[in-house]
Amino acid sequence: MKFTINRSAFTQQINNVQRAIPSKTTINILYGIKLSLDSNGMTLIGSDADISIESHIAVDEPLANLQIEETGQIVLPARLLNEIIKKLPQDEVIVSVDDQFKATIQSGNAKFQIVGIDGNEYPRLPIIDLDHQIQLPTLTFKNMIHQTIFAASNQESRPILTGLHLMLEKDYLVGVATDSHRLSQREIPLKLTENSHHLEAITVPKKTMIELARIVPDNADLMMTISNQQIIFTFENITIYSRLLEGNYPATDRLIPNSSETEIILNAADFLQAIERASLMSHEGKNNIVQLDIQTDHIELFVKGNEIGNVAEEIQFVSSNGEELQISFNPDYMKEALRSFGDIEITIQFNSAVRPMLITPSVKSELPHNDLLQLLTPVRTH
């Protein structure tokens, strides 16, 4: 096995597949990246058994300058390979592998030798059926991920809550994430062909969604396929494979209130800054709680009863209607919810001091099924 390649192009694809490499695993070969050479080009694969990322560098890709002298495959330590390639002195990199799977990496006067593993020992990726691909609106889908995934649980005690739940309707896609303390839901319009409307509700692991959003360019053509309890995303020269989470996702629709006793309208970015100031004090206390006091003509955010000190701030608002209310909540959850809206006016609806508060944009989207909502459970203080 022997090839020559441009260092920058090689580094970029190593970085992409290395995102799937586990920090800890009992399967030692998964600490490595698999390199496979055939007459068409080079394929790189990184995997942690739950998510796999595959990248292909074609022989005719102009920036890669890939020249293949001898085909073959090998698994090399991912982090070491990445560090070596990044620090090589020249743009041209020559890699050769002997019969004992010892790789020699040369560039300029630098020469490294690494002991590798036979590529045939690497776990095989699933064979996928591409008959029912769904084309996703890439930038909008990335926004959906950013606006929801933070609400997915990190607790493995309920694995089904550690992912993004996707439901495909006739002309839109719904994404929901919840950790049972808060809920994020985003709908995005979708143009479907008859051939692509074959998706039951699925739940995709949090890591898969985060890495996809990091890797896929905003202007790429992003395709999604479901096959044999796997979800596959393809774009440009990269394929991401991931297992789906098993189990029944909770019926979240019934959690969303359709009426309210109290409603306020204010600017999300301004309210976020006030929460950030208040949380400086709440983080010093034992309970990390801020309180909101809503009157018809006055809204105040405060932290009191803290052994370190207190803080109070009057909140600017557009309108306040309904019953007067005092409610407590986790400021960190509120900050993440508010960031999902950006600098727009939002409506926050309340039903009592112990029932979830609903946050939505004050101005509805002109596009149908293009909605974002956040649901946040208050903290009981009595």
Image (cartoon, rainbow, N blue to C red):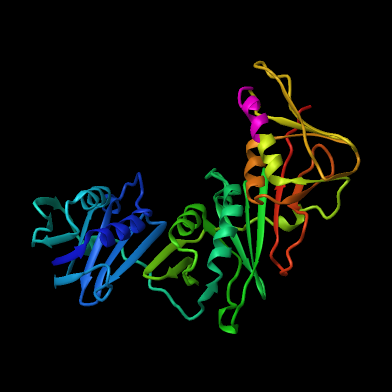
Q: Is residue 162 or residue 292 the one in the foreground?
A: 292
Residue 330 place in picture, x, y as percent: 67, 35
The image shows residue 322 at horizontal and vertical percentages of: 91, 44
Report the predominant secondary structure element of the magenta stretch. helix
Which residue is drawn at the image coordinates 85% and 45% (left, top)?
319
Residue at image coords 31%, 62%:
45
- In which quarter of the view is residue 274 placed? top right
Left or right of 178: which side holds 57? left
Q: Which residues are magenta?
A: 276-285
Question: Which residue is pictured at 47% across the width and 66% down the height?
Answer: 230
Residue 284 on the magenta segment: yes
- In this rendering, the answer to whether 285 lies above or below 81 is above
Q: Check residue 207 for magenta coloring.
A: no
**Rendered residue at 31%/69% (across/down):** 56
Which quadrant holds the C terminus?
top right
Picture quadrant of residue 216: bottom left
Q: Judge whether 234 appears above or below 15 on screen.
A: below
Residue 146 location, x and y as percent? 57, 54
Front residue of 380 and 250: 380
Whether residue 303 appears in this view of the structure is: yes
